[in-house]
Amino acid sequence: MLDPDRCWQAVCERDAAYDGRFVFAVHSTGIYCRPNCPARRPQRANVSFYEAAIDAEGAGFRPCKRCSPQGQSPAQQLDALVAAACELLRDEQRLPLAQLAARIGLSPSHLARAFKARTGLTPNAWAAAARRQRLDAQLPGAPSVLQAALQVGYAGTRALYEKPHSISPSQRRQRGAGEHLRYAIAPCPLGLVLLASSGKGVCALLFGDSHESLRSELQQRFAAAHLQEDGHALQSWLQAVVDQLGEPERAAHLPLDIRGTAFQQRVWQALQHIPSGETRSYAELAKQLDSHPRAVARACASNAIGLLLPCHRVLASDGSLSGYRWGVLRKQRLLEQESPSLSATKTSDPAS
């Protein structure tokens, strides 16, 4: 059941988050549009709302030629073109921007803006990151770092050592020889919590329902590391986390070893500036970071340090919980603890 007041607000704000959830029809023109149509805003008295394009057409309205509400939106078309660009980069790796844009059918500047807004990276940086991921997958079974590098498209090994990484390629080939992570698991108000630490600080804080699932998630996230359970050494840190879960005002100030791409780290840094008891939307963070809500949502979903990098404080544009890596119910519990006024927050399909 559509809420006409909320739909009208979305039309006034040209809120792209409502694209696909309803269309609005203008009686004076006989045209129906998407909520974020760039055309001149009509008078409220002339507007009706429909759940789908077929409903508006059944009522006698015809589709707007500017926003094409019966097909893919311009944003969805750009999403598809950026996805196609990613596939080309994955296959051919070293396409210059001009050639990539010509293959996709966009100008180089348009493609560069759309690509960075949706992935958080330039096409060149995305291709480099994808090649690095393929290298990481090859290293454990390769007879040498050089052979693994050549197999994924590097000309040699020099580029592998030009930028600092927490683990060298040779260490990754030996599945993390040299990196030692300690971890501990404890009961908490959200079930169980696992805290893992490197020599720099907390590198993972995960929630779950069983010791086995938590260990499995940690192993998947840090497949190249040697993991050692050490509840005694991490007892004080774990207690600080449990205290914060029970009493959010007792914030756990722990050193963090934050690992991710440059864009992910920008998002996670922005999360740390959201005060306890407050929330932000993916769109608000995207605007702050000059990015795209989907890119922000993907960065939130990649966060390995729950609570301390508070991705649970990010909601959908309509105020619904949207999603959470460790379950929407846990997200709701965290928000209710931090601000009881948020207890009525709605849930929807996971997006983070």
Image: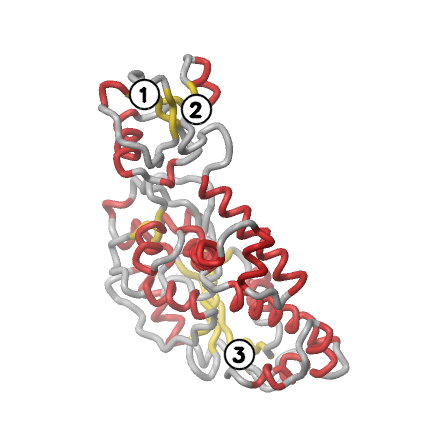
- Circle 3 Cα neighbour tier, 10 Å, few/some/many (<14 / 14–19 / ≥20): many
The residue drawn where x is 41% and y is 62% is 306
* CA distance separating discs 1 and 2: 11 Å
What amino acid is at disc 2?
A: Pro
The residue drawn where x is 41% and y is 13% is 59
Secondary structure under badge 2?
Answer: strand
Of residues 21 and 306, the one drawn nearer to the viewer in this rendering: 21
In the image, is 213 to the left or to the right of 43? right
Of residues 328 and 153, the one drawn nearer to the viewer in this rendering: 153
Of residues 85 and 19, the one drawn nearer to the viewer in this rendering: 85
Pointer 2: what residue? 63
Q: Which disc number belongs to residue 181? A: 3
**Given this view, does label 2 or label 3 mark the residue nearer the observer?**
2
Find residue 56 and report its horizontal and vertical position in percent: 42, 19
Placement of 168 over or under 33, stated as above or below: below
| Of callouts 3 and 1, the N-terminal one | 1
| Of callouts 2 and 3, the N-terminal one | 2
Placement of 33 over or under 316, stated as above or below: above
**Given this view, does label 3 or label 1 mark the residue nearer the observer?**
1
The residue drawn where x is 34% and y is 67% is 269
In the image, is 19 to the left or to the right of 44? right
Pointer 1: what residue? 26
Find residue 295 and report its horizontal and vertical position in percent: 44, 55
Placement of 102 over or under 322, stated as above or below: below
Secondary structure under badge 1?
Answer: strand
What amino acid is at disc 1?
A: Val
* CA distance separating discs 3 and 1: 61 Å
* CA distance separating discs 2 and 3: 58 Å
What amino acid is at disc 3?
A: Leu
The residue drawn where x is 34% and y is 70% is 240
Placement of 241 over or under 13, stated as above or below: below
Q: Residue furthest right?
A: 143
